[in-house]
Image (cartoon, rainbow, N blue to C red):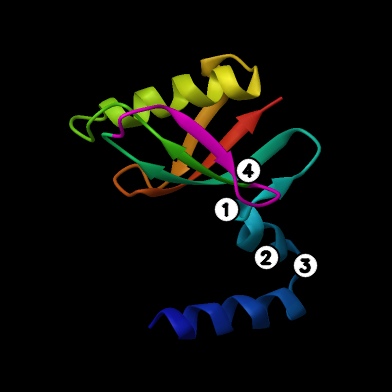
Amino acid sequence: MQRKHEHFCRRSNETRGWHLRSQHLHEPGFDGKNVLIKVHVIPNAKEVRVVKVGEADFEVKIDEKAIDGRANKRLVEILSEHLRVPKSRIFIMSGARSRDKILQVVS
C-alpha cells in the first residue's frame, strides 16, 4: 500500500505543481522561514546527548522515560538549548508516539 502512495505522489508532482509542495512538507530542509529536522530519539538514557548525523538529521539521547509525553517535552527543551531557539518555536510535526520524529523549527 505504501508503495502505491509513493508512486501516486511522484506522478502528481509531474502533473500538478501545487502537489509538489505538500509531498515535501515533512521532508527535512529549509524553506526560508522554517526548518524541518528528522530526529531519532533514545529515551531513558543515562546522559543527554545531541548528535548531528546528517544535514537535517539528529540523534538525541534523553534522560526521561517515554511516558505521558514526558520524553517529547524533554526533547523540545534539549533542542531548544542546543539550537538556541525558544521552546515555543519547536513543533513535533509527526512521530509524537514514535522514536523517529520530524520537528519544525520556526525562525
Image position of 15 with respect to 32: above or below? below
Q: Is disc 3 in contact with disc 2, using a CB cutoff of under 8 Å? A: yes
- Residues tagged 1 and 4 counted as in contact (Cβ below 8 A): yes
Q: Is 23 situated above or below 47?
A: below
Tell me the CA gap for discs 4 and 3: 21 Å
Residue numbers of the magenta segment: 45-56
Q: Which residue is mark 2?
A: 19
Q: Residue at position x 68%, y 38% from top?
A: 35
Q: Secondary structure at mark 4?
A: strand
Report the amino acid beneath label 4.
Leu
C-alpha gap between disc 2 and disc 1: 13 Å
Circle 1 SS class: helix
**How many angstroms separate mark 3 from mark 2 (CA)?**
5 Å
Amino acid type, callout 1? His
Q: Nearer the viewer, residue 13 or 78?
A: 78
28 to 85, vertically: above or below: below
Tag 3: amino acid? Gly
Secondary structure category for the residue under label 3: helix
Q: Earlier in the sequence, mark 1 or mark 3?
A: 3
Which residue extends farthest left?
67
CA distance separating discs 4 and 2? 18 Å
Reply above or below: 41 against 81: below
Name the residue nearer the viewer: 103 or 53. Answer: 53
Q: CA distance from mark 1 to mark 4?
A: 7 Å
Q: Residue at x 38, y 83 (%)?
A: 1
Q: Which of label 4 and label 3 is nearer to you?
A: 4
Please give the label number shown on residue 26. 1
Residue located beneath label 3 in the image? 17
Q: Earlier in the sequence, mark 2 or mark 1?
A: 2
Q: Which residue is mark 4?
A: 36
Q: Residues within 10 Å of mark 4 (few under 14, many from 20)?
A: many
Which badge, 4 or 2, is on the more N-terminal residue? Answer: 2
